[in-house]
Amino acid sequence: MQNTEKRLVSDLHIFLSIIATLIVIGMLFIYSSSSVYAFDKLGSGIYFVKKQLVGLVLGFGGLLFFRFMPLELIRKMSPYFFLGSTFLTLLTLLPRIGLRIHGSSRWLNFGGFAFQPSELLKISFILYLGYFLSKKEGKLSSFSKGYMPFLLIVSIPCLVLLKQPDFGMAVTLAMTAFMLFFILQFTIGQLITTAVVTIPLSLLLIFKYPYRLKRILIFLDPWRDPQGAGFQIIQSLIAIGSGSFWGVGVSHSKQKFFYLPMQHTDFIFSIIAEETGFIGASLLITLYVLFLYFGLRIAWQLKNTYSLLITLGFVILTSLQATINLAVATGLAPTKGIGLPFVSYGNSALICSLCFVGIIINCVYESTQ
């Protein structure tokens, strides 16, 4: 094996070690943050950890499946994956099949088993976007043959997600798509067109729905409604501030005693910061920085354009999700309903992410052959 190939495999091993570390941290703090709530509401303090372990096992199975699935077959099947996941996500809008939680229809309920198809949609979207961009590589500078079809493809999942509604995920997917597009084909005209279209549209989507505007106003001043809309972010900031430098100790959080809502999902970082302090929070953030760094290193060393694009897409998407989640937890962004990748509780997200990790492993070893 040549030096470049050895370096690529070495980077992959580090990348996988970072992901494994994040998952272990997630398991530990899912238990720590949810045990009180789970025992009180469900009669078992380890309820959410057991469910996450099931997701981990299924996700590892998916990782192995996509690791050995021919990459060319994945590329050819990507349009069908995308159409299928879009259809499943649309099914969440049906009253009897869709499961509505916290005001959003994001889950499908089959015989008591809840699944979030938007997680599958975001993964299949990256696969199909890589397929489209690699196929149109020489035509992307054309407005009619490259940029307009690209906008149409991006609009499909975004419109479906907005219907649920899942504004945060729609924005994250759109940002990832445009980053990939401009990495592959950058022109000032396309950048201006994108800004002219997306900025007014984003403002319209915010001002059209009062609850989104309220989120922004509460983000700017959570103390205007400390017992209502501002309660969650205030409790999050209290948790982070209580951690100080060293933290109060693992499993010794006070905010998990029904003060901080969604403490094991969207706001798990707040509990981590409370229990491990500035040191633990900094180490977690460092892991995500290293995830981005080694993910980008791996992508740029891949020989195949499709492999490069889908790896970049997954790394960018995951990093954006982590950034948004951390920003929300620390009061730097309005609440979005986006979990912390590989750490927050969520079977659907963990399974789909591990499946994509299997695809990245596949891309690396195909590139070294």
Image: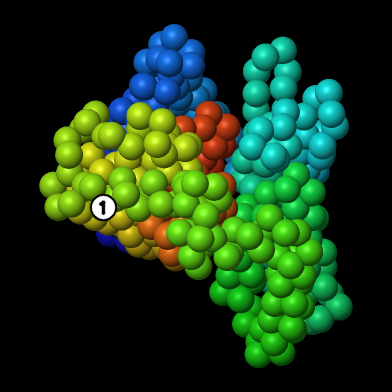
Q: Which residue is mark 1?
A: 241
Viewer-closest of 106 and 41: 41
Residue lying farthest to the top in this orientation: 43
Viewer-closest of 94 and 297: 94
Q: Residue at x 41, y 39 (%)?
A: 260
Q: Residue at x 62, y 40 (%)?
A: 119
**Quarter residue 107 falls in:** top right
Look at the image and tell me whether residue 323 can be seen.
no
Q: Secondary structure at mark 1?
A: helix
Q: Position of residue 256 (x, y in %)?
A: 35, 32
Q: Position of residue 280 (x, y in %)?
A: 21, 47
Q: Considering only vertical position in the picture, is 25 above or below 340?
A: above
Q: Considering only vertical position in the picture, is 285 above or below 257?
A: below
Viewer-closest of 341 and 267: 267
How many numbered marks, from 0 up? 1
Viewer-closest of 228 and 139: 228
Q: Position of residue 319 (x, y in %)?
A: 45, 57
Q: Residue at x 70, y 40 (%)?
A: 104
**Quarter residue 44 falls in:** top left
The local crowd at label 1, few if under 14, some if 14 to 19, many if 20 or more residues have their Cα within 10 Å, is some
Q: Considering only vertical position in the picture, is 207 above or below 70?
A: below
Color style of the picture: rainbow
| Kind of residue at disc 1 | Gly
Q: Residue at x 45, y 59 (%)?
A: 223
Q: Position of residue 350 (x, y in %)?
A: 50, 34
Residue lying farthest to the left in this orientation: 246
**Quarter residue 114 falls in:** top right
